[in-house]
Image (cartoon, grey):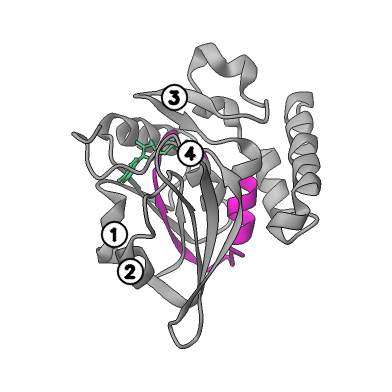
Amino acid sequence: MSNDINRMITDIEREVTYTSHMIGRKVLADRVMQVMSRVPRDQFVPPELRAYAFANGPLTIGHGQTISQPYIVALMTDLLELEPDYRILEIGTGSGYQTAILAELVEHVYTMELIPDLSDKAEHRLQELGYNNISCQVGNGYEGWQEHAPYDGIIVTAAAAYIPPSLIEQLKSRRKLVIPVGQAHMPQELVLVDKDAEGTTHTRILLDVAFVPLRQGLMEE
Ligand code: SAH
């Protein structure tokens, strides 16, 4: 493990400690942290930003979008409480970094991206890195991906104006959805939705976050 990744891991652990009263855990699962130290984040950022790839912050990836902060990626992954046989839906492929983290931990990841160019590039990058358990799709995440539903977990990596009902429908019982909720350029909250055995959902607000907006379509804004 390079020194840079070591530093990133220490930064994540420190931020988990600072925020433990909000996120309900003092440490993240070992296997999540192991994957964070294994997946080469520098392969997911534009070449001119490689020097900053292991800093604990978001970075621009073109089209006005960002690769999420490592702490947030680790936290959202941990919150899903993943098992190896899970099939996960991700909304907002972006660089594909979060997708790769998930793909290391579960059987299959279905990932949707609104911007065709980002989806194509992420798909290519993930193939080059040897992942064969990821399906990429261009589409609007507000609708989810009905074809492969229901999912063992759903993660949204852009801020939604509201929790999309189709995502709740496409989630299995006793499984979780993690999603930032809020208006663009306004404070947003990371929300953990639990669907119980009866199919009733329970939501918990964890902490303030800053994500790019989950858009209704390419023409919006
Ligand atoms: N998980 C990504 C984060 C990318 S930022 C990473 O680790 O790099 C959020 C992404 O969501 C952007 O690429 C944006 O284009 C995409 N997005 C925005 N609205 C969307 C929508 N309605 N459906 C699918 N993707 C959307």
Q: Is residue 112 magenta?
A: no
Task: Please state if 197 lies on the left or on the right of 9 as rendered.
Answer: left
- The residue that mark 1 highlights is 145
Q: Which mark is residue 149?
A: 2
Is label 3 within 8 A of ligand 1 (CB to nearest ligand atom)? yes
Q: Secondary structure at mark 4?
A: loop
Q: Nearer the viewer, mark 2 or mark 4?
A: 4
Which mark is nearer the camera, 3 or 2? 3
Q: Residue at x 56, y 46 (%)?
A: 101
Where does the magenta region start and end? 73-97
Going by the numbered disc 3, the residue's amino acid type is Ile
Of residues 21 and 114, the one drawn nearer to the viewer in this rendering: 21
User: Between residues 113 and 162, which one lies in front from this camera angle?
Assistant: 162
Mark 1 or 4, closer to the camera: 4
Q: Left or right of 7: which side holds 155?
A: left
Q: Position of residue 187 (x, y in %)?
A: 51, 41
Q: Which mark identifies residue 61?
A: 3
State how many labels appear. Answer: 4
For disc 2, the neighbor class at 10 Å (few under 14, some 14 to 19, many from 20) is some
Looking at the rendering, the quadrant in which ligand 1 lies is: top left
Give the distance between the C-alpha atoms of the residues marked 3 and 2, in whole angstroms.
29 Å
Q: Are marks 1 and 2 in contact (CB under 8 Å)?
A: yes
Q: Which residue sits at x=25%, y=32%?
A: 221
Residue 211 — which label? 4
Residue most toward the front? 186
The amino acid at mark 2 is: Ala
